[in-house]
Amino acid sequence: MDLEKQKKTPLLTAMKEYVSSQPIPFDVPGHKMGRIHTELMDLIGEDVFKYDINAPIGIDVLYKNVGVIKESSDLLADAFNADQALFLINGTTSGIMTMIMSLVNAKEKIILPRNVHKSVINALIVSGAIPIFVEPIYDEYLGIANGVLVSEYVKAMDENKDAKAIFVINPTYFGVASSLRAIVKEAHRRNMIVMCDEAHGAHFHFHEKLPVSAMDAGADISCLSLHKTLGSLTQSSVLLTKGKRVDFKKIIKVYTMFGSTSPSHILLASLDASRKLMALEGRNILQRTLDLAKYAREKINLIPGIHCLNASYCKNDNNKEFSFDETRIVITVRELGKSGFEIMRLLKEKYNIQMELAETYLILAILAIGSLKEDVDKLINALSEISKLYYVEKKNPTRRNFHFDYADIACRPREAYNATSKVVKIKDAVGEISTESIMIYPPGIPLVIPGEIISKNIVKIYRFYMECKGTIMQDSKIGYVKVIDRNNWNKGEGNDEI
């Protein structure tokens, strides 16, 4: 990495020069660089509107970049140890859609974990690819899915030698990363492309105590949400490629399909600025973040009935292949006799503390480069008060009367999505084939996807989330699900079963 070049911010600098020249705007957007007054302007300031420009002369075009955007994306690729970088303004979701659509065709196989984000399932629907699911290690005690063992990937690759690609989550929402270098080695031995969802791992490359990044592990393509951990603005992400296994021209072709033709240059400039910061100061900033996370875990672990995961979590027999992102504060609360949803709601309503998400037995706090010790101290104090309210020594921890599993797949997601359907009550859906995805958001990992058979256990879990008032995302209204109408399902019209 050329540190002298990394001091530049080509796009951001060009935007400053353009605005300071005070151009006469006859292009879009309609607010004309902030010449109308709105309530939003009172809130965020006039400068935001001034810099909300739309690819004027001299600023470059995102999807055919040859100027400052090209220079900025090349600098980002260099900073992240990649060969090419594409700026994304529709989040990592658009990057994942681009990856799968450009590299896996209809009826070609892709090997992937079942605990993928909804964007992956949507990409399967659009592409028509055949998913070969590998099972993650599931922690029944905490109620979370972790990484996938190398042996599970190898088994799937050996049983599906015609698979085009494999997909790896690096890391999971809860900070657990699979043994990526070993997985990449096994996949490349079989000439399979390795894709990575690094929405929550954008910071990995910049500190040696964090799990390995996809590019450093030799993966072919990955998507990173810089906005989640590295300080760019929400919705700004990047797609990285490395090596010759992926056709970059085809990636560009698909990339233009999933992006707005009016991209926000403020979002793009935030990527430029974030890259510079991390290239020049990333390790030191992340060391402070890791130190703060260590402090948080040590203090929280002293609170009765509350515990935090740390690196040792990935050294037990089940998870010993995995590594752990210690900037994640995964807090277990099951000994309080309350669900994670209840504790998360209490933290917000009583203490005005916003956690990232809740699950059955835990809550998650994400520490990132903007985290402050005073915020951590407020969380520690709030958890201490909550412990005094609810923790009872020697009381058996709360245990829900269900286990987590994934459904059997009956047909390709695209086949189910397009099939003749009907809507049934969730209680009557056991044995039916879903035509929609149902997920709790966040994290947006589906309980069931199009083409899967709904089991009794899935119905039980669904009803639990209803009781917890979690945010359930689905096409049908809550309490119902859209399923294949088998009596009127014409399988001869492309709805072939696997």
Image (cartoon, rainbow, N blue to C red):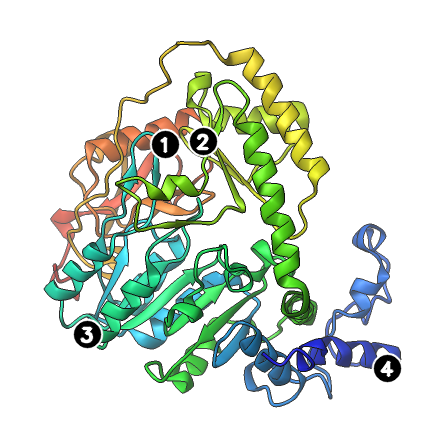
Q: In which quadrant of the rendered view does residue 41 lie?
A: bottom right
Find numbered disc 2 in the image and state the secondary structure of the residue it sits on: strand
Q: Which numbered disc, 3 or 2, marks the residue closer to the eye?
A: 3
Which residue is found at the position 67% from the left and 26% from the top? 351
Find numbered disc 1 in the image and state the secondary structure of the residue it sits on: loop
Circles 4 and 2, Cβ within 8 Å, touching? The answer is no
Q: Is residue 473 left or right of residue 103?
A: right
From where the camera sits, is residue 257 visible?
no
Nearest to N terminus: mark 1 or mark 2? 1
Say what amino acid the circle numbered 4 marks: Ile
Say what amino acid the circle numbered 1 marks: Leu
Nearest to N terminus: mark 3 or mark 2? 3
Which residue is found at the position 34% from the left and 28% from the top? 463
From where the camera sits, is residue 130 visible?
yes
Q: Position of residue 262 (x, y in %)?
A: 62, 73
Q: CA distance from mark 1 to mark 2?
A: 7 Å
Nearest to N terminus: mark 4 or mark 2? 4
Label of residue 362 in the image: 2
Q: Is residue 98 left or right of residue 67?
A: left
Q: CA distance from mark 4 to mark 3?
A: 57 Å
**Residue under pointer 3:** 190
Q: In this orientation, which residue lies closer to the viewer: 283 or 109?
A: 283
Nearest to N terminus: mark 4 or mark 3? 4
Nearest to N terminus: mark 1 or mark 3? 1
Circles 1 and 2, Cβ within 8 Å, touching? The answer is yes
Q: In this orientation, which residue lies closer to the viewer: 453 or 393?
A: 393
Callout 3 crowding tier (Cα within 10 Å): few <14, some 14–19, many ≥20: some
Which residue is found at the position 61% from the left and 53% from the top? 287
Find numbered disc 3 in the image and state the secondary structure of the residue it sits on: loop
**Residue under pointer 1:** 142
Say what amino acid the circle numbered 2 marks: Leu
